[in-house]
Amino acid sequence: MYTGITASSQTLRDFLTARLRDDASLGPFFDPGLGGTMIVSLDTPDEMIRLNQHGVSLWLYRVVRDENLLNEPPHRLNKLQYRHTPLPVRLHYLVTPLMARTQAAATELEQTVLGKVLQVFHDRAKFRGPDLHGDLSGKTDVELFVRLESMSLEEITKVWFALEESYQLSVSYEVSVVCIESEILDDLAPVETALTRSGIIVSREEAH
């Protein structure tokens, strides 16, 4: 399955959206039923601003191969067939709260939203089973781990420089591990003849 990246993003977005809507203080901003218009978007901060959207940008800005899992054995599908080892990757997300500057106390609200993001991902750092959405829904062998990255100001400034935007209050999260399945299936030759040998183990002295 090559849609694991998309499904991981959908899982995080839907989870964060639900928690923001359920919050007593932030629900009026994010819950449409309460008149809220803010959203959690997978778009870049700049794309959200150009679309006149506000809320939280959950932008996937980097995908890195996980070197530690490259030597995992291939997955055996049945007695006669196996699938090549999947490609394990780690996903890096830039999380940026975006409030309209016309919003009263916009700066304070951005900090409050970011604090809520930090809280919910601290309390739920592992996603599995019914937590998973998109094409990962129903997968019982998938676990996603969310970790707040300790990035220096220089590192995160480089990300904003690549966006060609002024730096804004934001944090980065790493999600691991997402596996991109191989399409290659190989056949296993069936065992046609089994040779058995038997003997008695003796010491070297006894053998002479």
Image (cartoon, rainbow, N blue to C red):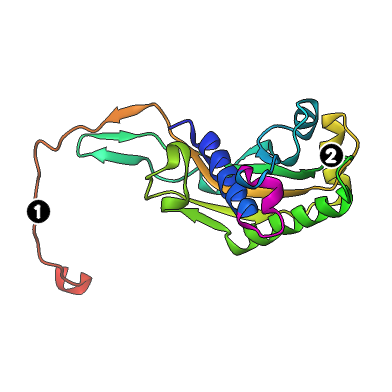
Where residue 141 appears, as percent x and y from the top left, is: 39, 50
Where residue 204 appears, as percent x and y from the top left, is: 22, 70
Label annotation for residue 197: 1
**Residue 175 showing in the rendered view:** no
Q: Residue at x 71, y 41 (%)?
A: 38
Quote the CA–CA distance across marks 1 and 2.
79 Å
174 vs 131, nearest the viewer: 131
162 vs 55, nearest the viewer: 55
**Placement of the N terminus among the 4 image quadrants:** top left
SS state under label 1: loop
Q: Please, is residue 33 above or below residue 199 in the view?
A: above
Where residue 159 appears, as percent x and y from the top left, is: 81, 38
Task: Check residue 182 for magenta coloring.
Answer: no
SS state under label 2: loop
Q: Is residue 52 left or right of residue 92?
A: right
Q: Residue at x 30, y 35 (%)?
A: 82
Which quadrant of the view contains residue 161? top right
Lower position in the chain sequence, tag 1 or tag 2? 2
**Placement of the C terminus among the 4 image quadrants:** bottom left
Q: The disc labelled 2 sits on which kind of residue?
A: Ala
161 vs 192, nearest the viewer: 161
Q: Is residue 74 left or right of residue 104?
A: left
Q: The disc labelled 1 sits on which kind of residue?
A: Arg
Q: Residue at x 69, y 32 (%)?
A: 43
Q: Which residues are magenta?
A: 22-32
